[in-house]
Image: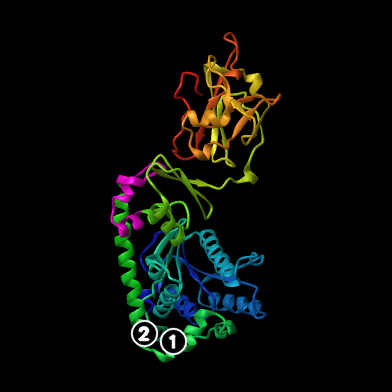
Amino acid sequence: MAASATPRTADSSAPAVAVAFSGGLDSTALLHAVTRAVTGQRVVALHVHHGLQPQADAWAAQCRTVAEAWGASFICTRLSGRPGPAESLEAWARAGRHQALHDMTVAAGADLLLLAHHRRDQAETFVLQAMRGAGLAGLAGMPRAQWRDGVCWARPWLDKPRESIEAYALTHGLRWIDDPSNAEARLARNRLRQQLWPAFPAAESGLAQAARWAQEAGELAEEIATEDLVRLAAGARLDLPGLMQLSPARRSNALRHWLSRHTAAPASLIARLLSEWRPGGTLNWPAPGGELHAWRDGLFWRPLRDLSAEQKALNLSRPGHYPQPGWYGAWQVEPASQGIAPARLAALAQRERAEGDQFQRAPNAAARSFKKAAQQAGLAPWLRHGPLLVDAEGRLVAAAGLGMDARAFAAQDEPALAVRWVEDSALPQSEGESPSGA
């Protein structure tokens, strides 16, 4: 058991190895094994104080005593706050625990975090995910090792039966904490432990094997999707006609993997998109964290605007790159022979398109309604709302995707700056297509 507790999945030259240590049977056995197997590195026990049980302070103190007695350092983080309106206590605690473990691992100078999940945990995860109708990613359960934000989360005992861990703990005379919440029948995982395993003691091995098969199937699906997306995805665009030429299962697989780069798309959204899109159609679908746009036979992702990061007053009187995180883009300002006087760019307001806005694309062109100007220029739907720049007198200076308004151009003998909009992603833009473009 001790030899299997330290997988070689991270940098062995790192000064420390971290162990998630709740004080329960499994993590106590793992910490004991790691402190005896690791040489040349500091072992750090990481404890998360959830503040949910009256015994939590005593548990943290006990964990510190045990860790230090075995020669390990000890770090404890207490979670703060409470679940949000639509968030369960379990989900809040899990998210807070994961973040705390990551932060403590990094603070300890480690890049390997060991967790004591075992075969029964994996089998329980498979059953719970199956009852929720999960796909391959959910049925695959917990990976043996996974890198996230510079930390390798490793589960060296994932194939070990719980009986082996308990036998190890008894052999070494270990003492551990029994969390009373593990007996609460309101939690689905606890009901499995109380009812499934006594009734089907041999199911654990088969369910864990099913999770391994799901992992392999998921890896294969990802390989196929990667091959398909090499042909179908260019920049931020997904080729919808090409996608539809694939078999139904393959197109769903490719779309799901493309969407995973941007959002956690529910199965219902994938089904709607595949059934509702028609060649040449301009459609949009709301999704977690943003919107999907079908435009010119391509599919594009647009994140929701971050209004808290929006800048409404700007000084663009000097050349430079001016990020606008609230709009997911930036204003690029450069010297130019044709452009806008710096003084006029010193006090700008940035806003959405409004009723009555007009845009003049070239000095010899007529001013047109913003809507018609955007349509004529073939402006992507997600850019038709702005941002727009107006000067101190409320006159339009520039519009994202359209460029500079010709009515704002400086006189020929005045110094001038060109202003253009640059998207954070490589989305199509019409700026620069005419001589007067920004």
Figure colour scheme: rainbow
Point out the tag, 2 or 1, that comes first from the N-terminus: 1
421 or 20, which lies in front?
Answer: 421
- Residue annotated with mark 2: 203
177 or 43, which lies in front?
Answer: 177
Q: Position of residue 365 (x, y in %)?
A: 53, 17
Secondary structure of the residue carrying numbered label 1: helix
- Residue annotated with mark 1: 196
Which mark identifies residue 422?
A: none
Quadrant in the picture for the N terminus? bottom left
Instruction: Mark yes or no: residue 204 visible.
Output: yes
Query: Please, is residue 318 above or below residue 89 in the view?
Result: above
Range of magenta residues: 231-254
- Determine whether, in the image, residue 237 is placed left or right of residue 420: left
Write the residue at 54% across / 15% down.
363
- Residue type at mark 2: give it: Ala
80 or 354, which lies in front?
Answer: 354
Q: Quarter of the image holding residue 159?
A: bottom left
- Residue type at mark 1: give it: Leu
Q: Position of residue 191 (x, y in %)?
A: 51, 84
Write the residue at 59% across / 42% down.
326
Write the residue at 61% across / 75% down.
60
Instruction: Mark yes or no: residue 173 visible.
Output: no
Query: Please, is residue 403 above or below residue 143 in the view?
Result: above
Furthest residue toward bottom: 199
Inspect the magenta stretch and tell me whether residue 252 lies in it: yes
Tell me whether the residue at label 2 lies in contact with that at label 1, contact meaning CB atoms closer than 8 angstroms: yes
Secondary structure of the residue carrying numbered label 2: helix
